[in-house]
Image: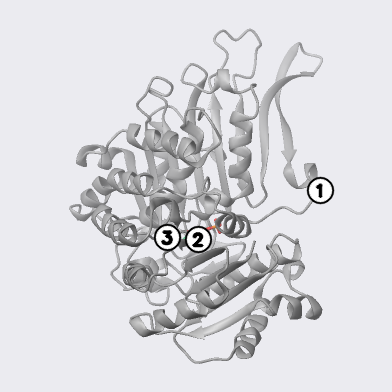
Amino acid sequence: MSFDLVLFGGTGDLTWRKLMPALFQAFRHGKLPPGGRILAVARDARTDDEYRAFIREKFADVDAPKQPREDEFARFAELLHYRRMDLSHADDYAGLKAWLDERAADTVVLFLATSPHLFTDICAQLGSAGINGPQVRVVLEKPLGHDLASAQEINRVVRASFAEHQALRIDHYLGKPAVQNLSALRFGNALFEPLWRRESIANIQITLAESLGVGTRGDFYDGTGALRDMVQNHALQLLTMIAMEPPPTHDADAIRDEKLKVLKSLKPFTPESVGRDVVRGQYRAGTIDGQAVPGYLDEPKVPADSTTETFVALRTEVQNWRWAGVPFYLRTGKRLAARHAQIVVNFRPVPHPIFPGSSRANKLVIKLQPEDGLELHLLAAKGSGQGELLAPVSLDLDFDKAFTSERVGAYERLLMDALAGRLNLFVRSDEQEQAWRWVEPILDAWRADPNGPRPYAAGTWGPPASSAMVARDGCSWDEEQ
Ligand code: BG6
């Protein structure tokens, strides 16, 4: 299969930080189909060789084992091409079309790694230039809109040029190996399915915690905030994977239909329930790994009076027969105590305890980061000499050890899927719009609330109100148990 992969925003952050390293890994693993070209387009004039040298230099920032040797880079670089384009000029799209037509590759993937405000113009221009034939797919990076109306507008323009199956919306969390494993755990094994319901599960906690701050992205982040940056997409996608019904097949639409049903079953927020069930926070100065770090308001390019949230914790429910009454807690934030992403499924305790001492319930921990794996927490008898006392033990599954072959990173996986036309891990427009529909009342309630976000010290787990919200149900966050 011959392919042309065009990276709009070819000199930008996303391209050299994530896409090029992922493409290089795919190349190194022999997964990049032969006979392909990768074309970076951006505003300034460069030759192919100048662009290759630019990318070579950027690889210095990549983790050592993922850095190319000189001979490997030289072979990879043969795939790389560069083209100057002004994205508002119709002539430049005609030039791109001629470049693509010269070769008439079997597959053309156009990856929009530009600022999202350009998406609609680029898609409209691609359509007018005729770069939207059946062999073409367009990949859109988040954030896709900042509310429902803007997301709908992007989808409307994209749809005018591309069919739904040609538009691939990336949520890189869906490319993470732990998320593939979540699907395998639920639908490849019969063990958990009978327990995967309200009768056996007390609550579910999804934590996406980062220890980093906003770094140099202060201007982007300040217009976005944690709800739009992490909850509307990554956290909700994980929730759908946990809560969805078993799909009838492994086809993209069968899976996405089930995910959409979950999003439609989420309990809608009202102004009152936002006050009670959503906590927003903003970090202040603190200490992370023994280092003093500044507060959000002192970060570069952040206004000193910003009320943007860097932390969100919320409680919701999936209103259907399987999940009625089970709290789903979502939590994400910057400058928290650790880089740590996991889903915890807390089971109900035994109905009639006969052992003295421990009343702990079982839990299943699906770990996404920093390493991925599964932990099943059980109680076992520890012969203490004073009667049967139970102690918690865990069954640990470390996927890096279980599978010795190369693990595939999220972007590598998603880029290869985009080239192959596998849509399972991309978000459909109706899912994305439904997610906006659900978060919008939170944005509205916050806009009307003069109190702003609650402060929390960097290096903690967020404002105390987050623990208080969970405690109201008699629960606690995983690290407090
Ligand atoms: C991105 C957000 O989508 O995800 C960033 O825009 C965030 O703010 C990043 O840091 C987290 O991704 P990961 O894979 O490092 O957990």
Residue assigned mark 2: 135
> Mark 2 touching mark 1, by CB under 8 A?
no
Pinpoint residue 342: horizontal percent, then vertical percent: 57, 43
Q: Which amino acid does the dot numbered 1 rest on?
A: Thr
Pinpoint residue 274: horizontal percent, then vertical percent: 27, 42
Q: Which amino acid does the dot numbered 2 rest on?
A: Gln
Which quarter of the figure has residue 418?
bottom right
358 shown above or below 138: above
Q: Which mark is residue 142?
A: 3
Residue assigned mark 1: 404
Q: Quadrant of the N terminus?
A: bottom right
Label 2 CB sits under 8 Å from any ligand 1 atom = no
Q: Which amino acid does the dot numbered 3 rest on?
A: Lys
Q: Residue at x 35, y 26 (%)?
A: 319
Residue 297 seen by the camera: no
Disc 2 vs disc 3: which is toward the camera?
A: 2
Label 3 CB sits under 8 Å from any ligand 1 atom = yes
